[in-house]
Amino acid sequence: MQLLISDANILIDMEAGELLTQLFQLPMQFAIPDILYWEEIEPGTPGLIELGLKILEISGEYVAYAATLPTKFGTDPSSNDYLAMALAKQEGCPLLTGDQALKAAAQAEDIAVMGTVWLLRTMVENKVIDVEQALSALNLMKVRKSRLPWDEAVRILNGLRKESS
């Protein structure tokens, strides 16, 4: 089963779209760095471990790697975001993020990156939700101030509707 490392942004988007339960129905494993979970996620959204979120520890070597990233890419991604990137590198798996600065840094480090729109498409393709549910979730994310490429997301989801016809 494919492992994906998430930053907080993705889980916040899924919560905004009321898709947390459906996220964990995908045939994938989702994980987050332990410190990011305890500092940013658990206080506001407890219960994700029970849904299937894995909490992983970053080795000392990769904590040191994360500490070098602000010098290389700037301080716009938070230290916890850089820890998510380091965990993805440690585990040799993709990073889930919607943070554009973190995405650019990860890509520069040859780490595959996917985001919220990819997850919505993947949920539809895996028949976890249908296109109408994805569009409804997208609308909730917009109302709740997620930052996504709205036009591109709608175009992709509408394209899935045409493919299934």
Image: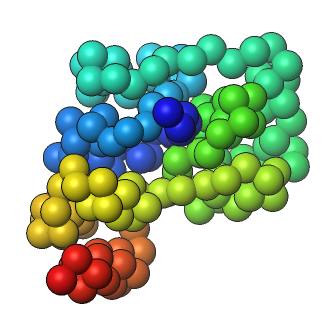
Where in the figure is residue 38, as x and y percent of width and height? 45, 17
Rendered position, 72 above or below 56: below
For image coordinates 22% across by 77% down, the residue present is 164
Where residue 1 sits: x, y (%)?
A: 50, 33
- For this orientation, the residue located farthest to the front is 165
Horizontally, is 5 left or right of 159 in the view? right
Q: Is residue 158 visible?
A: no
Q: Residue at x 73, y 49 (%)?
A: 111
Q: Is residue 4 visible?
A: yes
Position of residue 163 measured from the top left corner of the image (x, y, whole percent)? 28, 81
Q: Is residue 127 left or right of residue 79?
A: left
Tell me the residue at 49%/18% (across/down).
55
Q: Is residue 134 above or below residue 85?
A: below
Q: How many marks?
A: 0
Please tell me which residue lies in front, 57 or 102.
57
Residue 117 higher or lower than 72, as above or below? below
Please say which color scheme the image uses: rainbow
User: Which is nearer the eye, 53 or 75?
Assistant: 53
The reply, left or right, for residue 118 in relation to residue 96 is: left
Q: Nearer the viewer, residue 100 or 155?
A: 155
Q: Is residue 72 left or right of residue 51?
A: right
Q: Please give the name of the residue rendered at 29% of the width and 47% of the height, measured from the top-left corner.
A: 14
Q: Please identify the quadrant where the C terminus is shown.
A: bottom left
User: On the image, which quarter does residue 100 sit in?
Assistant: bottom right
User: Residue 136 in the image: x percent, y percent?
Assistant: 13, 65
**From the viewer's perspective, is residue 14 above or below residue 107?**
above
